[in-house]
Image (cartoon, grey):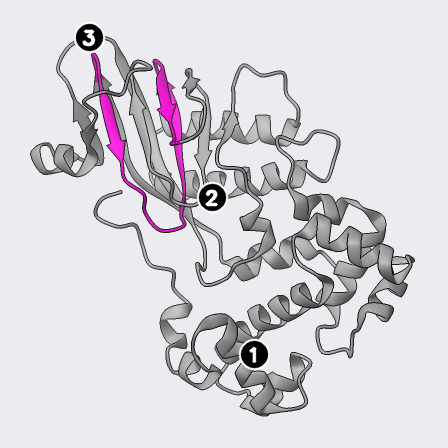
């Protein structure tokens, strides 16, 4: 069972582009917090300082990419000082992007950026997303820890410089691949960062239990049977799983069942009893109560709203 692929599929990961930015001279642009999207900035030319509250500032050079999860506020600047940073909305109101390019300043050193985001089904609170660090920096000049990540970065840069037909969707797919490769790196000895859930997948024993959950969510799992899949004692399994994943085994099982329930409810040919049974519930009322406790609405109400669920909203007018 390819657990990671199934999770990414259920999250409905999707990249989008805001715009390219050409920033001249001294600049400091403030981007407000915005939903749970993972923003990214690729430096195409020059250099840029990225400031996120409560984190160390990071200077990016040409070819470097930064991913900033959880919709955190941030400042992009030419210097470490961010005093007098201008709100992005103010810049956009005075100088809207022309043909997708935001121009700021008229003289001085040039910094060119490609700015965009990665979005996902924000109602899904999966440990894979929750354990992302507050900032992920991929540097072009770093010794390649992962040939796949290095290749994706090189392809992203090359495609950005080639303004051919279909450029935007190609760029978006490459960014999606980059995030997946960064997470996958945690499964090997070339981790870009430490991801608790990915570490659990890299552990042969915990991985067997996770694969069992994902392949048979309708099974009558309990702590003993899952510990048996892992080949561990009951107490050792519970402690190891909770430490790595951030949820108890039963809490993760319930969370994943409800995530799958959302997908099944979007299929109009399945009645509520069948959805409940496929998710391991013999009682429709019990299933409904659990679903409502996690998502804030009953499965019937969610099903009536399921049509928009198939299409994640596009990028907002401002960041």
Residue drawn at x 54%, y 49% as measured from the top left: 129
Residue drawn at x 61%, y 41% as measured from the top left: 183
The quadrant of the image that shows the C terminus is top left
Which range of residues does the magenta coloring cover? Answer: 24-53
Element under disc 2: helix
Q: Which residue is mark 3?
A: 108
Q: Nearer the viewer, mark 3 or mark 1?
A: 1
Q: Earlier in the sequence, mark 3 or mark 1?
A: 3
Q: Which residue is mark 2?
A: 173
Does residue 173 lie above or below 5 as drawn?
Answer: above
Spatial CA distance of label 2 from label 3 is 33 Å
Give residue 147's quadrant in the image: top right
Q: Is residue 189 magenta?
A: no
Q: Nearer the viewer, mark 2 or mark 3?
A: 3
Residue 299 position, x and y percent, is 48, 82
Q: Earlier in the sequence, mark 2 or mark 1?
A: 2
Does residue 93 lie above or below 263 as drawn?
Answer: above
Q: Which one is in front, 118 or 301?
A: 301
Q: Give the side of residue 180 with respect to residue 205, left or right.
A: left
Q: Which mark is residue 290?
A: 1
Q: Which mark is residue 158?
A: none
Residue 133 position, x and y percent, is 54, 37
């Amino acid at each position: 069972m390819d657990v990671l692929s199934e999770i990414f599929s259920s999250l409905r990961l999707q990249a989008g582009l805001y715009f390219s930015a050409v920033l001249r001279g001294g600049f400091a642009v403030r981007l407000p917090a915005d939903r749970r999207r993972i923003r990214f900035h690729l430096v195409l030319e020059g250099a840029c300082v990225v400031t996120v509250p409560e984190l160390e500032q990071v200077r990016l050079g040409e070819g470097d990419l930064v991913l900033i999860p959880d919709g955190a506020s941030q400042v992009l600047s030419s210097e470490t000082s961010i005093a007098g940073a201008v709100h992005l909305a103010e810049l956009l109101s005075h100088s809207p992007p022309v043909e997708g390019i935001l121009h700021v300043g008229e003289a001085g050193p040039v910094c060119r950026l490609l700015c965009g985001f990665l979005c996902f089904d924000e109602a899904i609170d999966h440990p894979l997303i929750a354990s992302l660090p507050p900032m992920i920096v991929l540097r072009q000049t770093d010794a390649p820890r992962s040939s796949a990540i290095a290749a994706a970065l090189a392809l992203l840069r090359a495609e950005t410089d080639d303004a051919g037909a279909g450029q935007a969707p190609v760029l978006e797919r490459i960014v999606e691949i980059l995030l997946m490769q960064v997470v996958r790196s945690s499964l090997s000895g070339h981790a870009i960062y430490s991801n608790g859930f990915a570490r659990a997948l890299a552990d042969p024993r915990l991985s067997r239990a996770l694969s069992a959950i994902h392949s048979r969510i309708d099974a009558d799992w309990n702590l003993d049977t899952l510990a048996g899949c892992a080949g561990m004692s009951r107490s050792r399994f519970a402690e190891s799983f909770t430490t790595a994943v951030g949820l108890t085994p039963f809490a993760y099982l319930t969370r994943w069942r409800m995530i799958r329930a959302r997908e099944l409810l979007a299929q109009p040919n399945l009645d509520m009893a069948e959805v409940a049974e496929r998710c391991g519930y013999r009682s429709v009322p019990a299933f409904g109560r659990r679903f409502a406790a996690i998502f804030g609405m009953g499965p019937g109400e969610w099903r009536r709203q399921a049509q928009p669920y198939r299409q994640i909203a596009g990028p907002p007018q401002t960041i």
